[in-house]
Amino acid sequence: MQVIGVTTQQEVHIVSRTRKFHINEILVIEDPSLQDPKGEVVETLAYNRLIPMGLDKSLVDHQILETLKNIGYDIESDEINVAKLRLFEEAPYPVRTGCRVRLPRFEEVRKLLVKTTPQEGMVLGEIRGTESMASSISPDLKDQVAMLEQGKYRPQKGIPFLFDIKTMQQYPHVGIFGGSGSGKSFGLRVMLEELMKLRIPTIVFDPHFEMDFRDHVPELKDRCEKLQNRSLIVQIGRDVGISFHELSTRDIENLLRAAGGNLTDAMVSAVQELHKRRDSYTSFSDRVSNLVKAQEEGANGLRRRLEGSDLTPREAEQINELLALLKEYNSLPAASVRGIHWRLNRLEKAGLFQHDIRSIEQGLELGKLVVVQGSSWVLQVFATYVIGSLYRKRREYKDQKLNGEEGRFFPPFVIVTDEAHNFAPKGVDSPAKSTLREIAQEGRKYGVFLFLATQRPTLLDETITAQLNTKFVFRTVRGTDIQTLREETDLTPEEAKRLPYLRSGDTFVSSAAFGRTVFIRIRAAYTRSPHVENPFDELEQVAAERNDKVLAVIEKHLPVFETDLLSLIGEIRRECGLDWDLSRFKQELDRLSESGQIVKHETPFVTRYDRK
Amino acid sequence: MLSVSDEIKRKLEKINESIRKLYPISVLDPVAIRKRLSMFGKFYKIEKWKDEKIKDWLSGKTLVGVDGSVNSTKGLQTRTLSVFQALAKGTKGEEKWATDVYTPLLEEEGQDQARQAQHRGKLLSRLELEVTQFAIEKWQPKAVMLDGSLFHFYIDHIEDWQKAAKVAEEKGVYLVGVTEEIGSQGLVKEVYPELKGWSDRDLLYGVLEVGEAFEWEDWSPVGSQMWKMALRSSRSPLPIGLDGLEAQKEMRFDLVSLVYTLTPEQGRGIPFWLDIVDNQVRVTDPLVETLVEQYIDPDLRHRIFMPKRNERII
Ligand SMILES: Nc1ncnc2c1ncn2[C@@H]1O[C@H](COP(=O)(O)OP(=O)(O)O)[C@@H](O)[C@H]1O
Ligand SMILES: [Mg+2]
């Protein structure tokens, strides 16, 4: 390998006749006057000078190439490999053309690539382009990860990528970007496994119901033992909810907003008037629904009813109460009150007010990873509440400590969510946004950190995006998103050009903590998501199962004649739960005979189905 | 179309007339030329070899192509720097390079253009012969094809040529020179003494069939100890020239067949292997520029080697 062509202080080109370059591999230029600078391959190219020659000529050349091949000429040997190398540090003057270039030994690049230990850091994957150093890797870094490539597990070959979580103090928050199928969820899972390994209290919002860690990958089972009992899954409405009496009027406004979009000014002032401190859900919602009732009937209607005969004292009392309500809140427009009523019902139906967040707090205090599941909108409502509430707890504890007071300990923690653009969209208001923004800007003071994943970086609130000091950029195809990512990271034009072609699981890590972009492949996850089934496989499997059942019933009766079919239909209904009529059943029998599972005999008199 | 002044049109028409006088249609009849030629030499029909045959012939040995290239900075004749490269390349992946640089600036006394050209020719021949000899000794090839006639080595650098030829004979390595254009005039002078200014190339144009060779025993000058033939190796009407060692003359038809076999029918008529070598060895303008830029101090570079023309803006 050798430096060729025009060089600059930042970049050189390298050629080799014999060695193919790997993108992102690290090479050492032997230029003693510059202390043997190192760099990373950012572009590779192999070209065969015979191919451009042969292009405008005819088949004859191929024939002659064949002849040459026949007498021992290997066309590939005339391939020239060219690589563009970007120096890690700018050289004071250009590298000399003609310098020899070699592969580094691990110790020469250790400092550049490894910033912590596998025990203290998050072991996230393998640094691409480091395979050539396999033999000189130090023992403490060997065999730290397993990799999954083309559906097959393989042992670690290169240097593991270790993310030093302690640097988050200085460079807080992580973003995970990439199009659908690029490996975000998979990468998130690996990160969560590592957070569990490190016993870092974590709360995960899981809109896809995929973050379940109980199912272990059998091939890697020795690696995941330490993850047992470190996670907890809670569902909104079943296990956790919001304690209504703790809510401030502002909280309630936010919840109502989340339940149905923006609140009108009239609605806001209605809430402010209707909500009283220490209201329980029941006291508040009764007040609202009674007011709705009263407004519908109107003062006159109510009074008329009061004048009517045969009222029990209880009924009279109720009507008087309604009248009193109507008088108290006579300024509130009925439409606004109805709107509040409707939204409140929606929250209630989701089971939001039947539980509290004690189990989440406990989980975090025990250093666990708590996964919160719920449908998308409920999750947003709940996240708004729970994030605000946990963050407040942590902040109060820290502030108290700062003032020398002895508060109740609440741990630092990490907040993780996929589809982050739904929680904090750019340009539009959303309930969770202001809290997330505050954490993005202030969180590190209190030890609260964000891991946000999204497939649409362009749609994520830009204040938050700018605070994500480490960004994992997976395959991205959309031009606007690539543009956004280029503005928000130090990805080079060459790297940006590669984004649409990355394989699932390959990612650029652009990190202030690392000081440069590293290209890695996320390791194999030790656990897997409960619904890995492909929907089409599922379809096939369901069809096959049904087929087997039907066949089992039929086979008991073979041979069957056309005249016997009706009684069989009844049995199939009972045994397989299939409500077929005669013609449908005949079609199914024909299908079975076409696929050779039974045989159909037709005579002019009768049709008979039999074993094959 | 550019507008062309009447004056230039007239001048070109006159030139055309004059050339026509030199090459009158009456003598350009291929049949007549063939008839005349056959009184001096012989025509041969050459076959292309099948893959099996060529493999047998090489008997596992390598086949080597040799070519060289020189290129210079653009500027005044005395203010140039030339880069030379020669390459011997074997079909089994062997390669031997030789390189040199030259500038008339450092010669004791000023040299005129002709002397310089001669010097460059000699230098390039020396490098080509160096890699040829290396290839013969180190790789034991069956044959070495050289780009250009062997005869020009004899003219340019007789000592090295004789050394190389001797080694080839001793080791039983066949040498064959391949020229794209036949530059000699001996044949025409012998066959049509009345045609002044003709070269052998003009005479042979379109006369041979594809795959046909013509041999005239006295083509090579006596002292050179070489055989020489013309071969129409492709569809192009211009034959190529082949020459080889007198001592290896009985193998000449094998060498002609070999060359013919390896030549694309559509191309310029020389073996593809030599095309490959040529392509690889060529000293391109950017290569010269880069080398000068890298290794010659900027002040010297601008003062001496950069023609003003480079700064032209249209
Ligand atoms: N690091 C990886 N190693 C191996 N396969 C991966 C990796 N990351 C993703 N994949 C494959 O790609 C698929 C899609 O990844 P996923 O994380 O679901 O994408 P996303 O969440 O970005 O839509 C996964 O099901 C898995 O098969
Ligand atoms: Mg996903």
Image: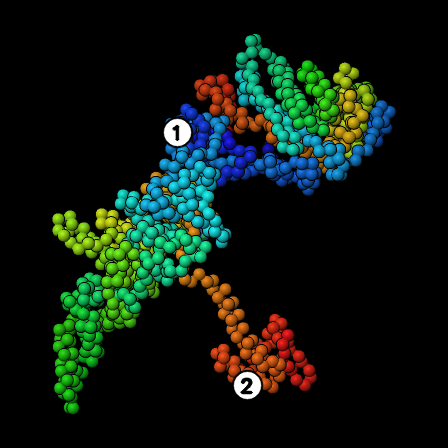
Residue that sits furthest to the top in the current view: B109
Which residue: 56% across, 22% down? B83
Q: Is residue A454 visible?
A: no
Say which mark, if any, is on residue B312. none
Which residue: 63% across, 78% down? A610
Q: In screen coordinates, is A46 left or right of B180? A: left
Residue type indicated by callout 1: Ala
On the image, the x and y values in percent for residue B10 come to 67, 26
Q: Earlier in the sequence, mark 2 or mark 1?
A: 1
Tell me the element at label 1. loop
Q: Which residue is mark 2?
A: A567
On the image, the x and y values in percent for residue B100 come to 57, 20
Q: Which residue is mark 1?
A: A91
Q: In screen coordinates, is B127 left or right of B245? A: left
Residue type indicated by callout 2: Ser
On the image, the x and y values in percent for residue A486 come to 38, 45
Tags 2 and 1 in contact by the CB under 8 Å rule? no
On the image, the x and y values in percent for residue A37 come to 41, 30
Query: Which of the pair A288/A449 is nearer the observer?
Result: A449
Give the chain letter at badge 1: A
Q: Quadrant of residue A516?
A: top left
